[in-house]
Image: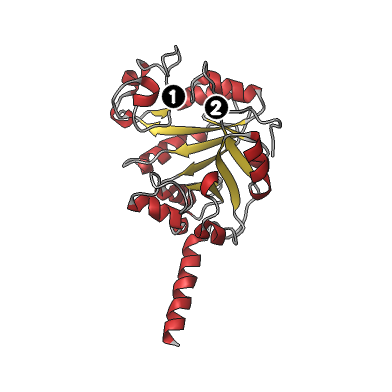
Amino acid sequence: MAALLIAAGLAALYLFLIAPRFRRRPMGALGKVWYAHRGLWNDELPENSLPAFRAAVGGGFGIETDVHLTKDEQLVIFHDDWLDRMCGVHRRITDCTLEELRACRLKGTGFGIPTLDEFLDTVAARTPLLIEIKTGPRVPRLCELLNERLTRYAGAYMIESFDPRAVRWYRRHRPDILRGQLTFGLTASSAVTRNSVTRLLATQAVNALGRPDFIAVEAASDRSLPLRLVRMFRAHWVAWTVRSQSQMDQLRPRYDTQIFEGFVPREDHP
């Protein structure tokens, strides 16, 4: 009997930990578009470049993008932690000043790394944004500066992060902004779940910190048991990263919206 009570208590605790926001909020306009992953990029327009963002706006799509904090506390739009893949420079982006980053070119093109201000000015509130806060030792400061800038932005946006500290920051300081926990299932590739931090994310237990409005899930691993349990709660669901129209069609019944790349959806809205 005691063993059953302990098991029941542990099960109840786990459900409490994985629960997203207890009261579901409508997504409104934020749930009425597909999100172009790092802009509508291609071989000529690099990811997270201003032309790729303009292309997404022109296509009627929302934009998913990434924000880093530089060494001199400037906010820039870039995905990777390191500059190697996109710029051919072996430096960590957070170790660079904005002036140093201005010298970098994206994939050998004439396009540079945009600042957050340049990105927001380019979009000009014409389409919804899904902004990923990148993880790192200065996450609270990144959140503070990002929020300070976005309070002056007139467009619709929501935030997401793999780092539950960022989701928690928004829960505490800007509960009015829709917030999402980026995650993946336990069935994700071993390269993703090979360390203790990412395995903890895959258990979904970090949801207790931020109580996210939506769960942003790697579509290829969304059938694992923890995610199935989270689906009992009334959170919104966002799929990433969808790479074909057939995959988008398959996922559509289970997700409020999707983040796509590598193709142009036949419709611009869910």
Q: Residues within 10 Å of mark 1 (few under 14, many from 20)?
A: many
- Residue 218 shows in the view: no
In this view, the residue farthest toward the top is: 110
In this view, the residue farthest toward the right is: 267
Question: What residue would you read off at disc 2?
Answer: 39
Residue 245: percent from left, percent from top: 65, 34
Residue 98 is left or right of residue 131, and the answer is: left
State the separation of the CA atoms marked 2 and 1.
15 Å
Quarter of the image for the N terminus: give it: bottom left
Q: Amino acid at mark 1?
A: Thr
Residue 257: percent from left, percent from top: 63, 42
| Residue 52: quadrant of the picture | top right
- Residue 160 shows in the view: yes
Q: Residues within 10 Å of mark 2 (few under 14, many from 20)?
A: many
Question: What residue would you read off at disc 1?
Answer: 115
Q: Residue at x 31, y 21 (%)?
A: 89
